[in-house]
Image: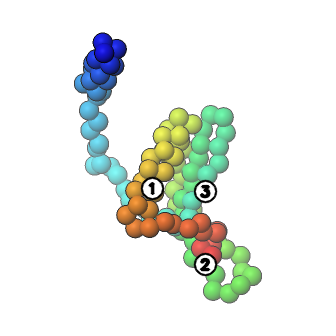
Amino acid sequence: MAEEAKKTETAETAAAAAPKINWDDSQMQSTYANVCNAVGTREEMVIFFGISNPPQTEGVDLSVRLSNRVILSPHAAKRLATLLNNVVDQYEQRWGALGPQAAGGK
């Protein structure tokens, strides 16, 4: 019983000590992307965002105009992966499952 009280007290203390995050969006810019790709090294993960306009005929190469590159530490990339998984799970619970989609939207 004393151990449970100690765990609860520790959790409450940690929650009280957690800093409040103030999100400053005064310099934020929004960009649309329908394509993304990622590469990584030991030191960083890089995510590329862009727009693809699918070709109207078969056999024509697909062009992607890259617009943004985000460089993250591996720890930040892991947090982003967890966040995105949670957001997609919430989306699918509300709107239905998303199927896998091949490159080029096929």
SS at mark 2?
loop
Image quadrant of residue 21?
A: top left
Q: What is the residue that sits farthest to the top in this orientation?
A: 2
In the rendered structure, the answer to whether residue 87 lies left or right of residue 39 reads left
Residue that lies at the very extreme toward the front in this rendered image: 1
Quick check: 8 above or below 89? above
Q: In the figure, is residue 36 to the left or right of 24?
A: right
Identify the residue position indicated by label 3 in the image.
Answer: 37
Q: The residue tagged with tag 1: helix, strand or loop?
A: helix
Foreground mark, 1 or 2?
1
Residue placed under numbered mark 2 in the picture: 54
Distance CA(mark 1)–CA(mark 2): 28 Å
Return the mark for residue 89: 1
Give the CA distance from mark 2 to mark 3.
17 Å
Q: Where does the N terminus fall, quadrant-wise?
A: top left
The 10 Å Cα crowd at callout 1, few under 14, some 14 to 19, many 20 or more, is some
Direction right: furthest residue: 59
Q: Residue at x 40, y 67 (%)?
A: 95
Circle 3 Cα neighbour tier, 10 Å, few/some/many (<14 / 14–19 / ≥20): few
Q: Which one is nearer the viewer's eye here, 41 or 98?
A: 98
